[in-house]
Structures are given as C-alpha cells and as structure tokens.
Image (cartoon, grey):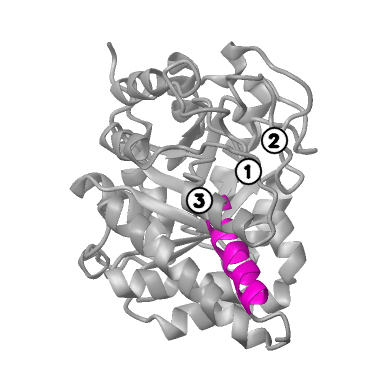
C-alpha cells in the first residue's frame, strides 16, 4: 500500500478500538526490524524520525531508506512521521521530504528547552496545521510538558526537553486547556502530559497514580472523546533488557518504564498512538553487547546487525500484538494524501477531530 497519513491509520484504530505503536528509527536496521514486524503481524506501521535522527542519517539517505520500506512492504499501510518538530520550518522540510505526518511540539519554544505559553503553542501549531492539511498531511500537537512527576525535571533525550524543574500543574495536561487547544488548532492527534518522559530513567519504582497520572488521561478522553490521544515516553524499559545489557558489560541502574498493562489501559481511554524509542535502542544494544561478549574476535558487521534486526522485530511484534493492531493492516482502506487534502478542505476531517463534548 502506498504512503498514508497518520490520520488514516488512527481513524481506523479508533473505530476498532486498538492502539498504534509508533516506533522511532535511527538507521536502516531499526527500520527493517519495525517493517518486518508489521508484515509478520499484518499491522499498519507508523515510523517516526526525530530531527536528530534526520541529522544522523542524512536526508538524502533517509528518503531512499523510506522509499525502500514502501517498495519492500507494499501491503503494509505506512505513515512516516516527524517526531518533535520544533517550528514551522522543520515541519515544512519534513513534508518536503515526503513525510505524511508531522508533530509540532509547541509545548516548548523553538530551542526545544524552554516551556512555552498557550498562545505561542496554539499559534505555531495552527500555522503547521494550515500548511500540512493543504497537502493532506496530518499533524500531532502537544499540550502540557513532558517530565517526571517524581522530580519535576525533564529529560534531554536527543537534545529535546526542558531545563530545570517544573511544578506538577505544568507537567499534567489540563483538561479544559486541552479542549481549547484542539478547537483552536484542529490537530489530528494530541500528545498529553501525564508523567511519562523520554529515555530509560522514567520512574525510580513501578509507577503509581502519584507518578503516572492515568486519571488525568481519562478525564481528557471523557472531555474529548473523538480526539486521538498520544502517549509519549511510553517505552516499558523491560527488566529482561536491563539484565541483558548489564550481563554483557552494561552499567544500567535499576529503572522502571511504563508497564504494558498501563499502556493497554490508556488505549481503552482514547490513546491511539504510543511512542516507543528507548526499548528499541536497548534491544539493539543488548544484542550487540552479547554478540561481542561471545565472539570477541569478530569484526563482522553483518554478524551483529542481523541479530539486532531480529531483536527489533521481536520487540515490535510483541507491541503490535499487545496493542491490538495485529491483523488490521489489510483492513485499512487506502486514502492518498491528495484525497486527504480535499477532505481537510471541505471540513469533513477537521470537524470530527475538533469536536469537544460539553460536560
């Protein structure tokens, strides 16, 4: 199936009650693992690329890699998404490269470090929505700032994240502000802050209601029942991967991610997109460490990267199955970006996502 927008996939996910893991890729091997898992489970796929990953791969290489994914997996509905775009220019560049979805993270200013205010966030996100929708590209926005409810601090993963410490009211999305934001911007999906954060060190112990604000998520979904919600920083940081890393020379302190059962609960309360990056990094790194520990004389790049692809695939298969999207890929009707642009222009899609239920 040719390229589709994120909105096409998330509308289907909402209709059938499943969630979509959105996997961040860093290189060809992680991309292959994600796509092979999608094929194996007959799932749609959302592949995400951060600005730092773009810089690492290089746009010329990246576009060819993504074109190869589309050609090699013709039966998989694929959305290519920019994660944490920091301004209109970054989103325009991604759309120019062929991305079918972008995130405008206006919760921080363009430096990616300073918390913004509502007016800034709403204005910059609206400008991205206008530009993207004219081209049939979907837009994810964010209201509230990602950070730890334990420490009040953010995480500088890939250079993105606020500096210093914020109060809890800044780190948990306000329900009414979320409703205003969706109405004001017409975003296709809304990332909310509930205590999750980027990186491996999310929680010092298994999260509770004090550190993972699931009640806030449920309130937002009750207020915005037709809005596709997004959970960032949702890697589970599996104990077995921590153990594997440390067994073969790593020094990962004990840490806790978002339990899979909490993600499954979130999906029941409107979360349609679940961002996963750290788990893939850990799976790849643990596999490579194991290979060299067992074969210290090897210098065969393929020798350690093929198992890394398999480790990525295995992790992604589990997420596709646990989140309920396995088997749904062939059921998604293809809608091209040109047709999506027409639907945005006539207001059909905009009205659906911007509806907020009065309480």
**Residue designated by label 3:** 276
Which residues make up the magenta segment?
Answer: 278-294
**Residue designated by label 1:** 199
Please tell me which residue is depicted at 73% across the width and 30% down the height of the picture. 162
Considering only order in the chain, which callout, 3 or 1, is on the residue closer to the N terminus? 1
Q: Residues within 10 Å of mark 3 (few under 14, many from 20)?
A: many
| Image quadrant containing the C terminus | top left
Q: Are marks 2 and 3 in contact (CB under 8 Å)?
A: no
Apparent side of residue 286 relative to residue 55 in the rendered image (left or right) = left
Examine the rendered structure and indicate whether residue 344 appears above or below residue 67.
above
Please tell me which residue is depicted at 59% across the width and 38% down the height of the picture. 254
Q: CA distance from mark 2 to mark 1?
A: 7 Å
Please tell me which residue is depicted at 29% across the width and 52% down the height of the picture. 322
| Image quadrant containing the N terminus | bottom left
Q: Looking at this view, is 297 or 137 the one in front?
A: 297
Considering only order in the chain, which callout, 3 or 2, is on the residue closer to the N terminus? 2
From the image, state whether disc 1 or disc 3 is nearer to you. Answer: 1
* Residue 155, disc: 2
Spot occupied by residue 19 in the image (x, y as percentages of width and height)? 32, 47
Spot occupied by residue 235 in the image (x, y as percentages of width and height)? 50, 45
Examine the rendered structure and indicate whether residue 12 appears above or below residue 75.
above
Q: Are marks 2 and 1 in contact (CB under 8 Å)?
A: yes
Q: Decide whether residue 285 is among the magenta residues.
A: yes
Q: CA distance from mark 1 to mark 3?
A: 10 Å
Q: Looking at this view, is 251 or 101 the one in front?
A: 251
């Amino acid at each position: 199936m040719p390229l589709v927008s994120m909105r096409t996939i998330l509308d289907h996910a909402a209709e059938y009650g499943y969630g979509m893991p959105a996997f961040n890729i860093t290189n060809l091997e992680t991309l292959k693992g994600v796509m092979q898992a999608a094929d194996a489970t007959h799932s749609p796929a959302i592949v995400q690329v951060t600005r730092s990953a773009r810089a690492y791969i290089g746009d010329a290489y990246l576009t060819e890699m993504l074109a190869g994914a589309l050609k090699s997996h013709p039966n998989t509905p694929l959305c290519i998404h920019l994660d944490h775009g920091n301004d209109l220019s970054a989103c325009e560049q991604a759309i120019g490269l062929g991305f079918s979805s972008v995130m405008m993270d206006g919760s921080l200013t363009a430096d990616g470090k300073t918390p913004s205010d509502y007016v800034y966030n709403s204005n910059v996100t609206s400008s991205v929505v206008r530009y993207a929708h004219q081209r049939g590209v979907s837009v994810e926005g964010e209201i509230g700032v990602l950070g730890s409810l334990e420490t009040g601090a953010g995480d500088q993963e890939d250079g993105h994240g606020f500096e210093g410490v914020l109060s809890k009211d800044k780190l948990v999305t306000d329900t009414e502000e979320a409703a205003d934001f969706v109405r004001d911007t017409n975003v296709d999906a809304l990332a909310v802050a509930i205590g999750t954060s980027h990186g491996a060190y999310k929680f010092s112990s298994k999260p509770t209601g004090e550190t993972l604000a699931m009640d806030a998520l449920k309130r937002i979904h009750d207020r915005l029942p037709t809005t596709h919600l997004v959970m960032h920083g949702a890697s589970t940081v599996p104990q077995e991967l921590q153990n594997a890393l440390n067994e073969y020379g790593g020094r990962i302190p004990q840490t806790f991610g978002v339990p899979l059962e909490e993600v499954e609960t979130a999906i029941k309360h409107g979360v349609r997109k679940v961002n996963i990056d750290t788990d893939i990094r850990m799976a790849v790194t643990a596999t490579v460490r194991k290979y060299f520990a067992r074969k210290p004389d090897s210098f065969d790049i393929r020798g350690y990267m093929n198992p890394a692809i398999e480790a990525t695939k295995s992790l992604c298969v589990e997420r596709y199955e646990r989140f309920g999207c396995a088997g749904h890929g062939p059921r998604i009707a293809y809608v091209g970006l040109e047709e999506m642009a027409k639907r945005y222009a006539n207001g059909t899609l905009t009205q659906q996502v911007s509806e907020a239920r009065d309480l």
